[in-house]
Amino acid sequence: MLYLYNFHCISTYFEIPFLNSLNDEKKLNISIEVVKDQELLIPEIFKKKEIGIVANLDKVIIFYKNLAYFEIFRNGEIIKVKELFSKKKKNLFLSKFINHVLPYALYQKRKLVLHSSGISKNGEAVIFLGKSGTGKSSLSASFKDCNFLSEDSTLINFEPRNCYVSPGLPLVKLTKNIAKRLEFSEKDKISLPGDRLSRSYYRTSKNKDKKIILKKCYVLAWGSKFEIIKVNSKDFLANFLSSTYSSYPYNSCKESMKIKHKFASDFFSLVPTYKIIRNKRNFFEDNKEIWHHCDFPN
């Protein structure tokens, strides 16, 4: 059976219960086709690794031990999958596919996808960048008076005078303690057995805005005291480049790097970028100051 989704225009051989499927193939101009191919050969260099990635504009290969092996090619139009997971890890497979594999297909289509989370209100958005563990998802989920934008990856589109973002899934990955602190219901939990940080998916409000202007970007970091400061061009470039889905190993594809630096230049000229330094012990006590700085329209 073939499943069709408007989310990045994909057709898959498996159902994604987190997404609304289409029942008419004519409604979808299929741009990413996902097929099962158990005959794929996993490269020897990956056999002893937990995770393996090699990526360029011609081909992307991604390996998750005991989960799946992927090959992406033909300008991101084809994703081949070799399943390695047990039944109980199906949701974790879907999470990796949506948040990590699809962004690499979009990279091959020369689209900008940032490893980030974010929030929006009244057609405007802010996103949070930062290293793994800096609390991007939990910070986004803590702002209950706005729409949750994205959990792990954000698609960015440029127009002459504005930068736009596309909403992702209405789901966020949180640890049990953070979910309890933010008063998420256990009834809405979707377990992710095998997640590295023992997180589960929790449902958030669905974003109904179709065209959302990206007004600000924040780089998250931990420190001794709370502070919001403007990011200079050098710091911005380092954080931006490390947050993009692009060629891997780094600098292994010259054309990718040209595209990446052009995206960085366009982004920096259009989107004010700041660094938020938070004290880990304070959790969300500084949210009022962050919200005020976001300056969303009423």
Image (cartoon, rainbow, N blue to C red):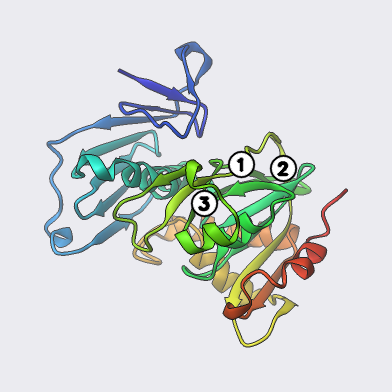
Question: On the image, numbered disc 2 is attached to which residue?
Answer: 212
Q: Nearer the viewer, residue 246 or 218?
A: 218
**Residue type at the position of mark 1:** Pro
Residue 264 appears in which quarter of the rendering? bottom right
Pointers 3 and 2 in contact (C-beta within 8 Å): no
**Residue type at the position of mark 3:** Ser
Element carrying mark 1: loop
Answer above or below: position of 134 versus 99: below
Whether residue 163 is visible here, answered yes or no, is no
**Residue type at the position of mark 2:** Ile
Q: Nearer the viewer, residue 272 or 3?
A: 3
Element carrying mark 2: strand
Question: On the image, numbered disc 3 is attached to which residue?
Answer: 153
Whether residue 51 is visible here, answered yes or no, is yes
Q: Nearer the viewer, residue 250 or 178?
A: 178
Question: On the image, numbered disc 1 is attached to which residue?
Answer: 167
Q: Earlier in the sequence, mark 1 or mark 3?
A: 3
Residue at the image position 64 percent from the left and 58 percent from the top: 142
